[in-house]
Amino acid sequence: MPTHPPRPLLGLCPIGKFVFSHEDALRQKRALQKRLRAWRVPFTDLDDVLPDGLVRDQAHVEAAVRHFRARGVDALFLPHCNFGTEGAVGMIGRQLGVPVLLWGPRDEAPLPDGTRLRDTLCGMLASSKVLHKLAVPFSYIENCRLDEPPLREGLDRFRRAVNAARALRSGIRIGHIGQRIDFFWTTIVNESELLERFHVEVVPIDLVTFIESVRARVRRGEAAYRGQARAARRRLDIEGYADDQPLINVLAMRDQMLAHVADLGLDALALQDFQSLVDALGTYGFYASSLVGDTCPVSMESDIHGAVSLVLLHRAMLGADPVFLADVTVRHPEDDNGVLLWHAGAPTRLRRPGTRIRLGRHWILPTPLAGMPHFPLRDGPITVARFDGDRGAYRLAVGEGESMPGPLTLNNYVWMKVDDWPRWERRLIEGPFIHHTAMGYAHCADALVEACRYVPGLEPVRLNRQPEG
């Protein structure tokens, strides 16, 4: 069962050249290695592969590529340590076919005699031209000193981008429990195209079989489930259940969902929430989704694109926190730049501190059945993301905001303040997006935009205004 996605492994490929100071290049390489270890960035270098661990000649390409392939690197980091062997840079980047990061330490002033130890900026300009020439997509961190913020910030952004992009480069498995709800035309997707272009595999899970498996779990473990139900009544405010049986069914549903995640090697689930499942179990099952969502992304209403959105955001967050598929619902009644993010089935770990979870009735649909979770979400920085597309054109909408005060409502919700909601609204409605969006507590929109460089056919759409220049 997936928990936190593993951190991407960097192939550290220090670049030197036969000109300028070899000793200074070694100092720069060692200083960078020390920083990466202090920042706990997983990497493999060339110290046991090439003399002094530096690529200084095109003859070094084969050994470097062979080593990085054997180690299974997810990305290539090309720090230019004194100048640049641009042909080797281009060939290594092209042959490995992984995301590439270009950076070099800012050059100091010339020595008193007028000579210079390195021309790093000049070397990177040469290398970037070759990467362009060979159609190798790359990211760039501005020429800065080792202890300056752009290096650490840029490296963090790149690692998050790589982690998100490799989901669509190496593959996502989404377990789809049930089928698309008939009247939700917004969630019609092209499964074949998703598989062929983005390596997204939708694994069908028959709803009848799922329901029977839940019932079998109840029969096998009824005594244990009754104990869990009693404990849940002490933690939760439960309304509308005549006895513990509906809650027992929800707990068994949780375990069956987790079993599918583990047995099928799934990265996310997409669930047909109603109405067959609700009628069969005598309860809404959103609380099961809340519990599963603490460790594995769960998309509601058979939204496959929503599941992809959740995985991309979760990866960009390096798996540090759960993510939630929210509805973009209503504008704030008093703030023109506020909007409500709302739905049911939010991960319990996102609950606002000091509040209790309430399981009650569905306040929108007229039904006697209970089991709908009600709790507000916590405050903090928010990133939203929506992967979507029609007729072969796919886009990833990304934006950042902050939680804000707002009126009480039901189910799971947080009010979000953004820079220019009318702009957001127009960009979302002009499409090809719907009301569902992945949300998580972090600011990582830049990383998601950068990830699109490494996913052919995926265009980023920024929802926030960007600074001019």
Image (cartoon, rainbow, N blue to C red):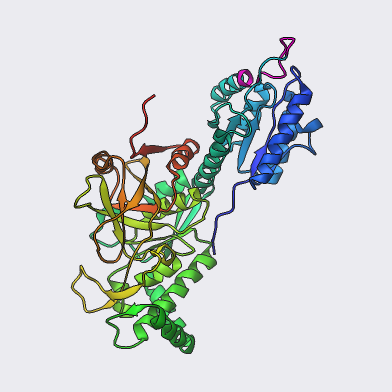
Looking at the image, which residue sits at the far front?
112
Residue 56 quadrant: top right
Is residue 189 visible in this depiction of the protein? Answer: no
Q: Main secondary structure of the magenta part?
A: loop
Is residue 10 rendered magenta in the image? Answer: no
* Above or below 89: residue 47: below
Q: Quadrant of the C terminus?
A: top left
Q: Looking at the image, which residue is at 55% across and 55% down?
A: 5
Q: Residue shown at 41%/53% (left/top)?
A: 440
**Residue closest to the eye, 44 or 349:** 349
45 relative position to 104: left or right: right
Please state if 31 lies on the left or on the right of 176 as rendered.
right
Q: Residue at x 68, y 21 (%)?
A: 83
Residue 86 in the image: state x and y as whole percent: 65, 22
Image location of residue 435, percent across then percent down? 28, 52
Residues rendered magenta in the picture: 112-123
Q: Residue furthest top?
A: 113
**Where residue 369 sits: x, y (%)?**
25, 78
Q: Horizontally, is 365 left or right of 277 in the view? A: left
Give the number of marks. Answer: 0
In the image, taking residue 206 as reference, residue 135 lies left or right, namely right
